[in-house]
Amino acid sequence: MSKINIVIADDEELFRKGMRFLLEREPNFNVVSEAGNGEELLNFIHTTEEFPDVILMDLKMPEMNGIEATKAIHKSHPNIKIIALTSYDGKSFITNMIDVGASSYLLKNTNPKTVIHTINEVFSKGFFYDEKVLKIIHENIISSSGKRIKSDLDKNLLSKRELEVLELICEQFTTAEIAEKLFISPRTVEGHRNNLLLKTQSKNVAGLVIYGIQKKLIEITPDFNL
């Protein structure tokens, strides 16, 4: 079983220790470090030889907050998945974190089972949004306040195969599952995914899902993330 390397970034030491205790009970989780603020987190990433796969990121931290840290990490290490884990549930916080590259958004009163499930989903599929977050993303697109993805893209921008891959990504299938369904190799799926990222100007797989919402390739339903 491959281990998921995790870093916990939060300015409350008691919360970090409690979260670490919870996560380390999972056989496929490996907590490689903790950070009390964004600067500590960036220093770790720039010096470590054991990169995290997933970061649990608080929003409000001294020195450098979670939004700025997410922005910096996503620019330098786009393959690291970031899950916002915070007590702030306002639309502006959620929108900002998604916009700078967060792959999921959880509240600190979330039950432990959901946290564990979300980490696994983000690691394997690149994103995990619950109904509330999806609705906020959708509202942001409708209100035209979300500028991340162009709405006037050429209809012929994506090939038929790229559309098929995008639809399966939006349905939360893994690379291996998409390869099996389309009778192509996982490497070919990765190639199509990279092309999709470039063509839609998305920052990560989560951005492709937002593109899918905008283009009505997926619907916002209560059971979307099940």
Image (spheres, grey):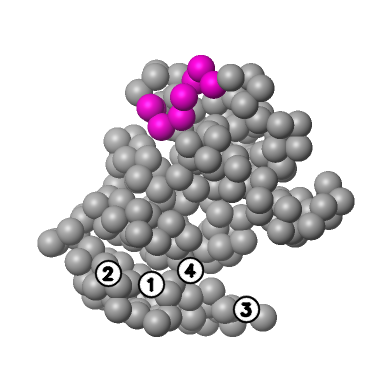
Q: Which residue is mark 1?
A: 7
Q: CA distance from mark 4 to mark 3?
A: 11 Å
- Give me the residue at 48% from left, 60% from top: 79
- Indicate the amino acid at tag 3: Ser
What residue range appears in magenta? 146-153
* Dot placed on the residue nearer the N-terminal end, 2 or 3: 3
* Dot placed on the residue nearer the N-terminal end, 2 or 4: 2
Q: Secondary structure at mark 2?
A: helix
Q: Which residue is mark 2?
A: 41
Horizontal and vertical percent position of residue 11: 21, 67
Q: Which residue is mark 3?
A: 2
Marks 2/3 in contact by CB < 8 Å: the verdict is: no
Q: Secondary structure at mark 3?
A: loop
Q: Which residue is mark 4?
A: 53
Marks 1/3 in contact by CB < 8 Å: the verdict is: no
Marks 1/4 in contact by CB < 8 Å: the verdict is: no
Q: CA distance from mark 1 to mark 4?
A: 8 Å
| Count of labels in the image | 4
Horizontal and vertical percent position of residue 61: 19, 60
Q: CA distance from mark 2 to mark 4?
A: 14 Å
